[in-house]
Amino acid sequence: MANLTQLKMLEDLNGLLLIDKPVGLSFTTVVKTVKRKFNLVKVGHGGSLDPAASGLLILLLNDANRFTGDVMGADRLYSGSMRLGLKTNTHDIYGEEIKNSEVPADFSSKASQVMSEFKGDVFQTESRWCSVRREGSAGYEVADTGEHKPFLAHVYKFELGDNVEGSSSLQFTLSATKGLIVRTFINDFGDAVGCGAALESLRRLKVGRWSVDEAIAFDKLLELEMSDLSSLIKPFTKEF
């Protein structure tokens, strides 16, 4: 039970809490857990992050929720890996397989030919099928989210790692505006090179000017006392 001094301190906590979310947890679980553990009045977030993804999750405490739109509207930076030769209905490795192909020997050449199509403005339509992980479940289920309308996003950078011979996994780095559906982006890239690709892993590195390097790991956050929280709060500024 918080004492009066702690309650007053919590009321005055206004700013951003940067968390390094692990794979397997939903962002809503992180928000609810932080709010409950530290007896916070109002906790929002600056953009969702899928359970299968890790990395930067920004929480907005108390009056900082006025700036939710500013944080949500910031650009994003990701790193991740794709599974070449695999196409699924959810556009990630947790969905139902649609096609499984060999990675062509000239993959690098084909990739180079289509890379320009995956920079700048890109239109994409999210799959109606989505991989979801229920709380307490070890695996993923496929849910039908209905038909989606085409969406326009902007990609600033899309770079591939080295294609290691004999491996179907390929690393990538991606910088884009908010709303880009990374798993659909990777699926479309796989279609363009002809062998298919599914999102294998994803880590969010930056949102606007905020970096995961500044964030506290979620498990470490849970070890802290209420009095330690204030030292982690960052003031909001519109310097993106």
Image (spheres, grey):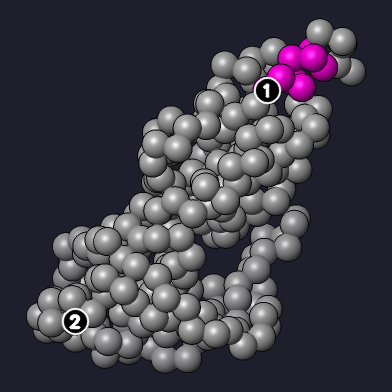
User: Which residues lie in the magenta part?
Assistant: 6-13
Q: Percent position (x, y) of residue 122?
A: 34, 77
Q: Is residue 2 left or right of residue 189?
A: right
- Taking the spot 43% from the left edge, 81% from the top edge, the residue there is 124
To which residue does mark 2 refer? 114
Picture disc at residue 37: none
Residue type, mark 1 in image: Leu
> Does residue 123 appear in the picture of this structure?
yes
Where the C terminus falls, by quadrant?
top left
Q: Is residue 19 left or right of residue 189?
A: right
- Taking the spot 89% from the left edge, 18% from the top edge, the residue there is 1
- Label 2: state its secondary structure: helix
In the rendered structure, does residue 207 fall within the stretch colored magenta?
no
Q: Residues within 10 Å of mark 1 (few under 14, many from 20)?
A: many
Whether residues under marks 2 and 1 lie with C-beta atoms below 8 angstroms apart, the answer is: no
Residue 119 versus residue 53 in the image, above or below? below
Q: Across the whole image, how many numbered discs are drawn on residues?
A: 2
Cα distance between the residues tagged 2 and 1: 48 Å
Picture disc at residue 13: 1
Magenta: predominant secondary structure element? helix
